[in-house]
Amino acid sequence: MVKKWNLPDLANFEALVSTADVREDDQKAILETLSGFKGKEESQQRQKGLRVWFERAKPRSKEAGEEVGNRLRVTLGIVQGLALIISFALGVALIGGLIEKVGLTEGKAYNVWKLIAITIGGQWVFLILAVLSWVILRNNSRKMTLFEEVGGQIIKKMSGKQAARGWNELYRAGSSYRAILSWRVARIAQWAAVSFNLGLIIGFLAILLFLEINFFWATTLQDIGLPQLEKVKNFLSIPWGWWQPEWLPNRDQLVLTQLQLNELNPDGKPEFWFPFLLGSFLFWGLLPRLILAGYCHVMEGRSIGKLTFMEKRHRDLWRKLTPRVNTRTNYEVSQDGVILIDVGGTDATTEELRPFLLQHLRVNPMGRFTSGIVNGDEKEKALQELEKAKRGVVLLVESWNLSPKQLKVLHEKLRSVIGTNHLILYLVLGLPKGGVTQAPEEAEIAEWESFVTELHDPETEIVAYKI
Amino acid sequence: MEQTNNSIPTFAVVGKVNAGKSSVLATLLEVDDDQVLRISSTPGETTECKDYPVEFDKKEWIRFVDTPGFSRPIEAMHAIKELETTEEKPNFKTLQRFVEKYHRSGEFEDECRLLSPMLTGSGLLYVIDPSKPLRDAFVAEMEILRWTGQPRLALLNKKGDSEEFLEDWKKTLGSYFNLVRTFNAHTAKYDERVRLIRSLLEIDEGNGKAIETVLNFLEMEWGQRREESTEAIITFLEKALTHRETCSITERDMSIDSRKERKLKELEETYFKKITSFEEKMQKQLLKLYRHHLVTVEQSPINYESLDLLSDETWQKWGLNRTQLAMAGAATGGAGGLMVDIGTGGLTHGFGTLIGALGGAAAAFLKGGDLPDFGFSIGGGLKMEEADGTALSVGPPKSDNFAWILLDTSLNYYAQIISRAHAKREKDTLTHDGSSITRGLQQSQRKPFARWFASCASGNPDRGMEPEVFQALQEILGNLEEKN
């Protein structure tokens, strides 16, 4: 069973990618895993295959190893923990800070309008603005939103230098990991908001439990104030009012809690408001944040599931990990190659002689060098090239131009280089007529034959050129 | 599938001298090296049988044998007939007797050589040029090949334009061969190569598995080449679009227009040379992937130099820009402050270092230009000299079209490379005829490129966009393969 990816593992993986530590058995293991994913999309195959490699390469790398992922995991835990604590404290502080002293007796009380506007309204304004910025900025720019940027930078700084390499790849703007990071930052933010609402609720309950608190509302415009408050009450109770109608203060109770001449009505009991406000905090504060935190969690998982691992460094690694077709391209060179040594500088060109060499002698001229001329003697160069000539040497000689001593020296020199098993062939050319090389005279051939016989070399032949 | 050497499907490529047997093999096996497979207009280039094993992953799956052409088919046919017994028409055994008799005799040397592979069980690909008339010699060749009784495929490798004899050929070939296919070795591309190998399945079903494996490998290999070509092109584009040439110029030279212009011109020349070198590297990679050795890479045919480059000037002191100078100031100030901290025995609680660093950074940032100028020369030692300067930077071209030109050039090269058959032996150079492939792209195809190009031109390539561009480019290369 191949494990699923998560954010710390991805950071660890990125640190390992740069090591490109690929071994032959990694390829086999991946191939085995992928055999179960044949026909699936390539991105899915890469997710599984790279995970297999990651699990194998992790223990091999002392430098990258688990360290990067662990540091990021710890950092994320610390960031989330701090965010929860701070948010909880903020929630408690806020609910405590909203208590007002009213009237001559300076009785402690909540202004219901203010309480609802700041605790629930403020959160929703913040949430709507965040969602709007997310929608607008994410669609128009491939960069992170400011909130994501700040959150990301904090995590990056806290992760330390060791995690930087993996993290940098994760964090780089425009990377395919951006969505995952965004959802993780959003998830932390939503859990912080959950904690904030818990702080509000617990603080609220504690205040009710340990302090004598009243509730009031005030208005200057009598005709508008009360109906508006009723509307707000009805709206906020939509999610739960049908379930607990007795939690809703009625019109008379609302009237009783109105502030009159800056004094609280002694008949306006806090019980009228307490269940309604608690229900509102639960359903408009805590519940949406819980839903959003869950949603961010799911979306982070989906973003991970959508990873294609198609960025350049992933493609390079994937190519190393998956079997590449290894085609043979180095065919053997034809075994009929010969070197032509033009003795004395004949007029016949290689192209002119080529058909005769191929069709009659079954050899292929691979190179031509000249020997026995005043300027540009290439004998030494020819000797170096003899290695390539699998079938030996063809000496181009002119029928009328037999110099036994000179040729004998050349012959011995050649034999000392190519050994005794390779052919030395004397191709005797006649005089050219009208630019075309002719066949030699029979008498001249006879002279050449006797010369070759005197060489006493069984691997030497003589052939007369034919048109 | 385990294969042993004995069960490897083998196909001999036979035909008249100069019919293009080696050309067919060169294109089929992607060999453009004359040392390995000789091709020229000289008849009789192939003098001996030579095996060409098709190996994938170090295992041989199929083998082709290049053979010398028929030299004397009519005489050979008569010689074979003379060997037939009264009970039987010429057949496999008769051919065996023929080879036994004439092998090393000096007579029918080519015929003996070319028949040898078939006598050991290989199938055969008979290559003919249908632009030539059907003569008796060809009929004799076909007759001899039929006597082998081996799986036979006739390949029409048309060298000339004439179609006058095509019908005659088709009618005749049908009665001698299991299958007739057209394959022009000098123009055939990947698809045609695959089609030819698929044809072998039809004539040799017994070796179907091995042939199908070869087809699978070919498909995989082609996919890999396309992927690696995409990588080469995209790397080239990113390098070219993000490249900047920079140099430092003194304030005095900066104030003299002619000197500044000359410096800018030098930078522009270096910039374009660099772009050309990136392009050459990409071309070489593509040629290597598709195994072309006779195509050379030359200077870019595109006159990039007509394009105006973006240029930027950054003030410098002692070769540092303002931020770097501020950092250097902070380090210096911090070091001074540290001395104070040490001097007070730590009573200042590190404030000396902090104040020194902040002060040094601020002073260097705001008043860096007033710092004294020192210069050093071998003859004159240390002396006051101008050290204020400007970092000049050029590239990429102002026009947004530059990126599209580069992409078009790359696609043109790719199209040329994939449409060149390996049988061609003329040396060639990659050119860009100015035609635009990208103009034919749909808006949806252009969009990811446009966004990515813009990010590259800004010097910060969009990593999230790049995979999308990679896939779009791979698709375009696939379409080019279908069109070309």
Image (cartoon, rainbow, N blue to C red):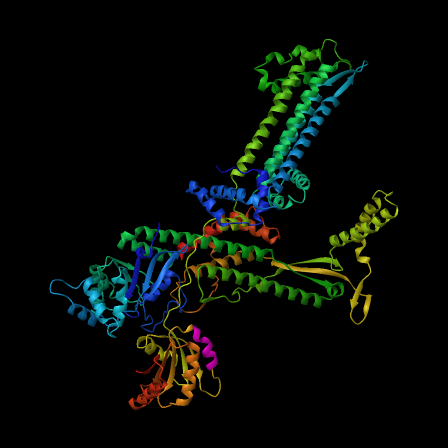
Q: Give the camera-side residue of B359 and A106.
A: B359
x and y percentages locating residue B435 in the rendered image: 47, 60
Relative to A96, residue A54 above or below? below
Q: Is residue B286 visible to us here?
A: yes
Q: Give the camera-side residue of B425 and B477.
A: B425
Judge from the rendering whether residue B477 lies leftward or rightward of residue B149; answer left or right: right
Quadrant occupied by the C terminus of chain A: bottom left
Answer whether residue B484 is magenta in the image. no
Q: Is residue B435 visible to us here?
A: no
The count of marks equals 0
Furthest toward the left, the residue is B86
Judge from the rendering whether residue B186 lies leftward or rightward of residue B273; answer left or right: left
Majority SS type along the magenta span: helix
**Res. A215 image quadrant:** top right
**Res. A284 image quadrant:** top right
Q: Give the camera-side residue of A110 and A394.
A: A394
Furthest toward the top, the residue is A267
Judge from the rendering whether residue B348 lies leftward or rightward of residue A412; answer left or right: right
x and y percentages locating residue A414 in the rendered image: 42, 80
Q: Which residues are magenta?
A: A379-387
x and y percentages locating residue A150 in the rendered image: 67, 39
Q: Residue at x 49, y 38 (%)?
A: A2
x and y percentages locating residue A350 in the rendered image: 39, 79
